[in-house]
Image: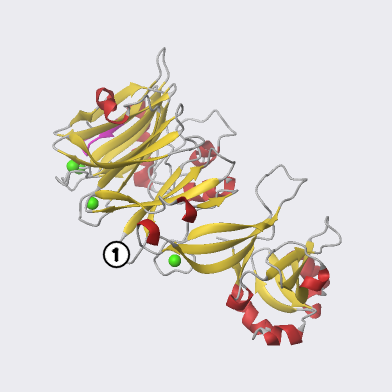
Amino acid sequence: MRLLKLVGMLSLVAVITTGCYKSGNDDNPINLFDELPIYDEEKRDISEKVKIVAGSANLTLPSNSIEVGKINEIDLNNDKKDEIVFFEKREDIRNQVGFTILDSKSNDTSYTESGNKIEYANFYDLDNDGNKEIILLVQDKNMTTLTICRYQNGEIEELISKANYHYFNKDNFTKLGVLVDDLDNDDNLELVVYNYNYKTKEMELNVCSFKDNQIYILDSTTFKNVRNFEDIKVVTGNISSKEKALFLSLPNDEDTGYITQVAYLKNKKIINAFEDKKIQISNGYYIPVEDVNNDGITNIPQIESSSVTIDTLSTSTFPTSLIISWNKYNGKQGDDADMIFVSQIYYNYEANFRFLIPNNLVGKLAIIEDTENTNGNYKVFNFYYNTTNTYSDTSSQDRKFLFTLNVSEKTIVDDTKNISKTGNNVYESDKYIFSVADVNQAELKKLDLTVDILKDYFSAIK
Ligand SMILES: [Ca+2]
Ligand SMILES: [Ca+2]
Ligand SMILES: [Ca+2]
Ligand SMILES: [Ca+2]
């Protein structure tokens, strides 16, 4: 997760112009980023200007830091000149969070409300009038509130305030999440608000439109037995070349797993694709949806539970390796709704590689680690053709040995030169050389596979 976070922040370099505004908390990775020197003169000027205007307020990074930065350059009022918007926190008797807008003439105007943290911030023209609204989710004690502001004629107008919170707070829902996208491709953005009720363990999904300075709920649907709010993930993806959908990963209260749900708009109504429990996929670990075969359609992961291996000595509870079957939604509703199998992929997170399982080995491949010296920089995996339907260790008569995969750190290879001699190199990553040895040619032949063909099946985990 740490790596992901870092990658997310590096991608911000292009949009953020944050300087070393304030540092004090050295173990915060965000501050590490802030310490980077700014080479761009213009960005440095903006950063200096912001520092002066912010005064005693601290700059703050909203939790959706992949989408926005502490300091943002954006044309809010469509006058073809960028405004500078920075998010801030004022620590006083009552904590305040909010933002300040600086126009091209350096006039500044601010908006703050009581709260500890900006959970979400973004700029979207929700009502299609050319002016971008500022959407804020603020965490204040145990309450999250939604605010929508407009910047016009040098002033900030609060369009939706805490007072309008009853829209989403009918039953004391106390947590909110927000996402904005044009879900039905009609050139109007939808505001998706999901709220969580700790008492009933229900999550309500509301698809809304915003016009005439008001939120209109187009449709809502409720998901039951949601374990907590923090582990809810909602992203947009595609269910066909023309249709978008919301892909939800919901922590299940009936076990410790995560259930994937798909919801999309049809004639402004929400279709809850997997309302029928039979086709709901539950995974023991959170795996994000992904377009694994690059066809533009979002794929849904299903962990093959018997393939999961865990390092019992590690503090991480996430598996070291597993097999995922990837699926797609068939686009049908009610009883006809179903999953279509797309592909099966073996993931090894320790050596950071994946192996796309050839079609005739789907459901039949077992990959078992056979490393003798676990302290060394050298790993050995045996690949078997399994006649039973489990991926883990089975009795030897149920499986046929296919080949050995040697994974060795590059420095070791360079030192001894003995690895490349003993096997066929099939893949190379930044850190490791992957080579195949002890090939059972007869069995591979039966499967129409060769070592050369296998090379195409190895890749790095993104
Ligand atoms: Ca402007
Ligand atoms: Ca607007
Ligand atoms: Ca729309
Ligand atoms: Ca796909």
Between 363 and 70, the residue placed more toward the observer is: 363
Counting from the top left corner in percent of width and height, residue 363 is at 63, 69
Please name the residue shown 36% across and 44% down the image. 43
Asked if 370 appears above or below 85 in the picture, the reply is: below
Inspect this view and state whether residue 389 appears.
yes
Q: Secondary structure at mark 1?
A: loop
Q: Residue furthest front?
A: 335
Tell whether 315 sits left or right of 226. Answer: right
Tell whether 135 sits left or right of 395. Answer: left
Counting from the top left corner in percent of width and height, residue 237 is at 38, 57
Q: Quadrant of the C terminus?
A: bottom right
Amino acid of disc 1: Lys
Q: Which residue is mark 1?
A: 242
**Res 168 quadrant in image:** top left
Between 180 and 15, the residue placed more toward the observer is: 180
Please name the residue shown 71% across and 73% down the image. 387
Asked if 73 appears above or below 247 in the picture, the reply is: above
